[in-house]
Amino acid sequence: MKFGGFGGGMNMQQMMKQAQKLQEEAMKAQEELANTEVEGISGGGMVRVTISGKKKMLGIAINKNAVDTDDIEMLEDLIVAAYNDAFERAEELEKETSPLGGLF
């Protein structure tokens, strides 16, 4: 059975195969993201945050020189900046690995 308006006469079975292939590629990409680690850095390397490609924080490393008990707010800002850097890198990685090219 053919449908003239779908993909230049593509039949339903072909469309279903393509959809299934796309779904499999998306699942594989999601699995790869979950197993990928991304690092964000701030303060010239004073604070490093490691997250998964799925944006779950995995670890944090703080250089002892970044710790000033009289200025805890600076350290807090460095942690936030490092996480945000890692998050943006993970977002970019997600777009690059998506079988839809980052459309969703």
Image: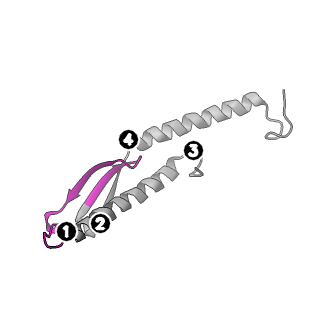
Give the crowd class for mark 1: few <14, some 14-19, many >=20 residues within 10 Å: few
Residue positioned most to the bottom: 70
Q: Write down the residue under mark 4.
A: 35
Looking at the rendered image, the disc whose residue lies closer to the viewer, 1 or 2, is 1
Q: Residue at x 19, y 68 (%)?
A: 72
- Residue 31: image quadrant is top left
**Which amino acid type is shown beneath numbered disc 2?**
Ser
Measured Cα–Cα span from mark 4 to mark 3: 17 Å
Judge by depth and name the residue closer to the eye, 2 or 67.
67
Q: Which residue type carries mark 4?
A: Asn
Labels 3, 1: front one: 1
Q: Hey, what amino acid is under mark 1?
A: Ile
Q: Which mark is residue 99?
A: 3
Mark 3: give few (<14), some (14-19) or many (20+) Cα within 10 Å: some
Q: Are marks 1 and 2 in contact (CB under 8 Å)?
A: no
Cα–Cα span, label 4 and label 2? 23 Å
Look at discs 2 and 3 and give the one toward the viewer: 2
Residue, disc 2: 42
Q: CA distance from mark 2 to mark 3?
A: 31 Å
Q: Which amino acid, mark 3?
A: Pro
Looking at the rendering, the stretch of residues picked out in magenta corresponds to: 48-71
Secondary structure beneath dot 2 equals strand
Q: Give percent across and percent down for residue 18.
A: 67, 34
Q: Which mark is residue 72?
A: 1
Q: Horizontally, is 21 left or right of 94 in the view?
A: right
